[in-house]
Image: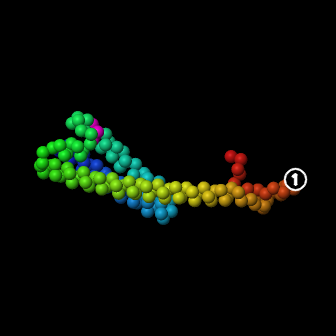
Amino acid sequence: MDEVIRLLREETVLCSRLTELFAELKKVLTENSPQVSDAVQKIEPVMRELSENELAAKKFLRSVNAKNFEEFVFSQQYSIQRELSERLLKQSASLHERLRNLVEETGRLLKTGRAFVDFNLNILSRTTTNNIYGATSETKSSGGRRIFDANV
């Protein structure tokens, strides 16, 4: 049970940290701040640690022939460690749900931001100008010049 408690505590701490970091990322995205890459760089190492924790948890669960922590914890005799494990399981489930909601909200913000950028690029790429930006044409063509060259 000590290993279960250790793994669940680590998972809870990491998920709690991730919820803070995703809330920070969400704030950065809503404020249109240029610090998005900084916020993402803070998330990446925590995600790696959580992945390592998940691998250790799977290895432990295989060693005790259990499908998940709930199955293992509820199969144990009642003790203080079991009670602590049950509380950690509930806390972990709550954090996972909160984290899932934050990730969904962040994903929606990113989609909205991308749609805004695409919209503005479409407007700019279709906008034509007169020849004030360069030398006058010798051929007197009637076609205007685009702000962005579409021949990439």
Quadrant for residue 67, please give it. top left
Of the 4 image quadrants, the one containing the N terminus is top left
Q: Is residue 22 above or below residue 151?
A: below
Q: Position of residue 139 (x, y in %)?
A: 87, 53
> What residue is rendered at 20% in x and 51% in y?
86
Q: Which residue is mark 1?
A: 139
Outermost residue on the bottom side: it is 31
As rendered, which of 34 and 27 lies closer to the eye?
27
Chief secondary structure of the magenta portion: helix
User: Can you say whether 32 is above or below 9 in the image?
Assistant: below
Q: Is residue 39 visible?
A: no
Front position in the image: 136 or 32: 32
73 left or right, relative to 19: left
Residue 120: percent from left, percent from top: 62, 59
Residue 118 quadrant:
bottom right
Q: Secondary structure at mark 1?
A: loop
Which residue is depicted at the point 23% across and 35% down?
Answer: 65
Q: Percent position (x, y) of residue 148?
A: 69, 54
**In percent of the image, x 45 and y 61: which residue is there?**
28
* Magenta segment: 56-60
Q: Is residue 69 left or right of residue 42?
A: left
As rendered, which of 52 and 93 lies closer to the eye? 93
Give the left or right position of residue 27, taking residue 67 as reference. right
* Colouring mode (rainbow / by chain / secondary structure / one colour): rainbow
Circle 1: residue type: Thr
